[in-house]
Image (tube, coloured by chain):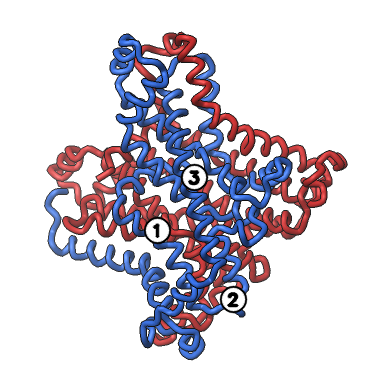
Chain colours: A red, B blue
Amino acid sequence: MSTTATRTMVTSGASTRRRPGGTRKMREGSRAETTTAWLFLSPFLALFLLFTAIPAILAIGASLTDMTARDIRDPLGVNFTGFEGFAKIIANPGFQGAFFNTIMFVVLCVPISMGLGLALALMLNNGIRRLKTFFRAAVYIPVITNIVAAAVIWQYAFSITGPVNSTLGDLGIGEPNWLGQPGWAVTTVVLMGVWRTTGTCMILFLAGLQAVPEEIYEAAATDGAGTWRRLWSITLPLLRPTTLLITVLMTVSFLNIFEEPYLLTKGGPLGSTKSIAVWVYEQFGFGNVSASMAGSVLLLLLVGIVAIVQFRLLRPKH
Amino acid sequence: MKTLSPSRQALNYTALTVVTVFMLLPFVWVFFGSFKTQAEFLGNPGAWFPESFQIDNYIQLFADREFGTYMMNSFVVSGVAIVGNVLFSAMAGYALAKLRFRGKNFVFPLVIISMIVPYVALFVPQFVVVVQMGLVNSLVAIILPVLILPLCVFIMRQFAHGVPFELMEAARLDGAGEGRLFFRIFLPLTGPGLATVAILSFLTSWNNFLWPLVVAQSQDTYTAPVGLSVASQASNTISFGLLLAGAVVVLLPILILFLFLQKYFIQGVATAGLK
């Protein structure tokens, strides 16, 4: 079992560990140590510069211009247009739709994934005796699955004459047009999103649960607290930091949702599943580079704001 | 909590079984579907099981030179990504956790920032950078962004904290150079960390989709997922069975590794939760 290691990683992610010796000693290294350190860090720093720092500056810069696909090879020929690009996309019904769809995916997927993940983690943690590893693996496999392969499967499984509908038809429930009607398409994307992220929630909740000391439950049980009472008064409060961490992770990941709607429905029908990321990719494909960059910058801002707000809540209270 | 009534356990087993069945159903369906003929798909599209197990789809898939190229590209990209991540993130993690130098408090936040920044928001400007470097439509461009994942640097830094300082100080006193410290003392002690990084970088590079989709512009640079998605969008012409066989082949390397290295997968992705 890897849960011990998992737990260390999860908790140490929240609070950076300090090395004994303090910060002052850390600064004094031999010349050889300093040289080695920078040498060892140079591959990371080079790629950080190329693929994070420069692109971030470029995105902000280009979103203030009228850059098109033609300017990609010669970016200096663009005209500065200021915030016009932002004003334009904010007023654009397509972008607005993408914005609301993205929020909708977050609102629908995050609670379902987390609720299901928590329930599974509770059952796996102390609700059964055997087959724990098997169930954990089974719920987890969709997380590591190749998304394109998964989408190929979902596309055919949920097609109008596919096995999902033929099974539903045999049961007499009805055969919805899963990918062809706005409401059903959203349902399918949400189902696939939940399918893909429940395992992550479950693993993180399991790691959180392992940190809850068994004695507390035993004491509570002696005092006559029932299962639900213990869940409500002990487990959930103690899981609060884990829960908030998972909330941030899931929210950010669904704000960025791209593959599910792009591969299943191309953002359709009628733009019903078009997320911000799909919109950005589309504009890029149309050659509207500056609009696409402005969309990226807004997405970045949105993710940043949401993450900061949630991190404020996450910070342990003293 | 230790004493669970049998009836409650039975209830939990039932619930877990139901969820598991739904989680695994797509895999069952793709597996059986990949053995169906095109005629079966057209005749009875919703059937779960093939009438007769035909391996024609797989034969045809591997006879197709293009799919072979896609798979080869995917293996090359993932192979280089594994080597790069294991080496570079071990180096960076070691420097951040075990070496004393000015500027450490500046570099570590960069690792955190690049872990948090969503790549979905950066792929367009990244494309501009790659075009400017003259690397567009090359495997190098596909590999570069996954060559050192910040998450792997973070993981290695965590594992590096577990290596005792005393051991390194003792070796230093014995006159070991910096390189020797890293290769002879540090690396052998961080095996599980390296394994986690290897798995995680394999998973990320093998499953990478959006970036190769943007950068690979001709068939000879497609990775398997890009090839699969392009083929599935031209689905009126292609056989369904062939596509499903392709999906199985793309899934297989991960599933096989997962069977053997479950522990490292879960460890890696529990940390990848930070993504």
Amino acid found under the numbered disc labelled 1 = Pro
- B144 above or below A317? below
Nearer to the camera, B134 or B269: B134
Between A229 and A184, the residue placed more toward the observer is A184
Position in image of residue A140 (x %, y %): 36, 56
How far is the residue under mark 1 from the one under mark 3? 16 Å
**Could you tell me which chain the residue with mark 2 belongs to?**
B
Per the rendering, the mark at residue A290 is: none
The answer to whether the residue labelled 1 contacts the one labelled 2, judged by CB atoms less than 8 Å apart, is no
Q: Is residue B62 visible?
A: yes
Q: Earlier in the sequence, mark 1 or mark 3?
A: 3
Q: Which residue is located at x 68 percent, y 70 percent?
A: A270
Q: Which residue is disc 1 drawn over?
A: B253
- Distance from disc 3 to disc 2, alpha carbons, whole Å, reads 32 Å
Instruction: Report x, y in % for residue A202.
Output: 35, 51
Q: Looking at the rendered structure, which numbered label has been put on residue B235?
A: 2
Chain of the residue under label 1: B
Question: For the residue marked with disc 2, what is the amino acid?
Answer: Ser
Q: Judge whether A219 appears above or below A171 on screen.
A: above
Is B220 located above or below residue A43 in the figure?
below
